[in-house]
Image: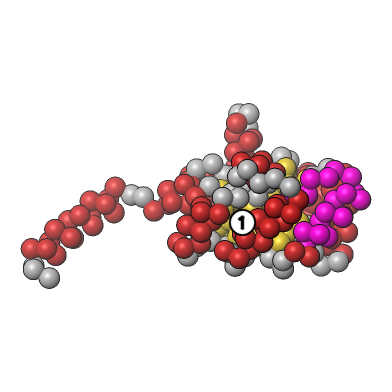
Amino acid sequence: MKFFIDTANLDEIKEAQELGVLDGVTTNPSLMAKEGITGKENILNHYLKICEIVDGDVSAEVIGTSFEEMIMEGEELAKLHPQIVVKIPMIKDGVKAIKYFTDRGIKTNCTLVFSSGQALLAAKAGATYVSPFIGRLDDISTDGLLLIDEIRKIYHNYNVKTQILAASVRHTMHVVNCAKIGADVMTGPLSAIEGLLRHPLTDSGLEKFLADAQSMNV
Ligand code: E4P
């Protein structure tokens, strides 16, 4: 399973990249706004800075909601850097835009997916990634992981190439469970990735090894 980090914070992206396990980045307008980035030029520059830090795909979301707006914005984003993936919302014009970009060899990430029907439609349009938001489903007492499982089954039935990008991952067990189900990618905060490191037996075991090594005067 690929690990993407879901942030526009350059320090966090650098930290994840230095760990050596980062495969890409996802952003959205809320994450960009959180970093205080304003104005089109600064936004485009920020995407470039992210692409310089990581080697893999970087999702940059369109803001327009009409087909024409999404095409204009998406083409500009795709031209910016070869690592850019155009992130498009799951709406009617969004589906048309995904098909348009697919036909031109431009990678897309279909975002705001909350049902397997939407995931099926995104795949039919040829999306590179489909992003079901598991954390936001959990927030309304619906099991987000069940959606990942359902999409995995549907895509398996038809050998669909669209990659399942489990989004809105909030914690470490989301990461582990997405891997158990067979999501292709997960995107979440750095804390969810770092949580995979932790086990008390690792800490106590290391403490004992170090104490015994010291007793050998090495
Ligand atoms: C997906 O690409 C989104 O950026 C993201 O995962 C949303 O996560 P949230 O529900 O924690 O805001």
**SS for dot 1:** strand
Q: Identify the residue at image location x=88%, y=59%.
A: 100
Q: Position of residue 119 (x, y in %)?
A: 75, 48
Residue 18 visible from this viewpoint: yes
Question: Which is nearer the eye, 29 or 127?
Answer: 29
* Residue 67 highlighted magenta (yes or no): yes
Residue under the image location 91 percent in, 50 percent down: 68
Task: Determine whether 147 is above or below 52 in the image.
Answer: above
Kind of residue sitting beneath label 1:
Val
The residue that appears at 12% across and 70% down in the rendered structure is: 218
Label 1 crowd (10 A; few <14 / some 14-19 / many >=20): many
Left or right placement of residue 80 versus residue 92 in this view: left
The part of the image, by quadrant, that contains residue 205 is bottom left
The quadrant of the rendering that contains the N terminus is bottom right
Q: Main secondary structure of the magenta part?
A: helix
With respect to residue 25, does 64 lie above or below?
above
Residue 36 drawn at (x, y percent): 63, 43
Total numbered badges shown on the rendered structure: 1
Residue pictured at 8% horizontal, 68% vertical: 217
Q: Closest to the observer: 200 or 194?
A: 194
Examine the image and state in which quarter residue 47 appears. Answer: bottom right
Asked if residue 18 is among those painted magenta in the image, a careful observer would answer no
x and y, in percent, of residue 76 in the image:
81, 59
The spot of residue 144 in percent (x, y) is 62, 39
Region of the chain picked out in magenta, as a range: 59-78
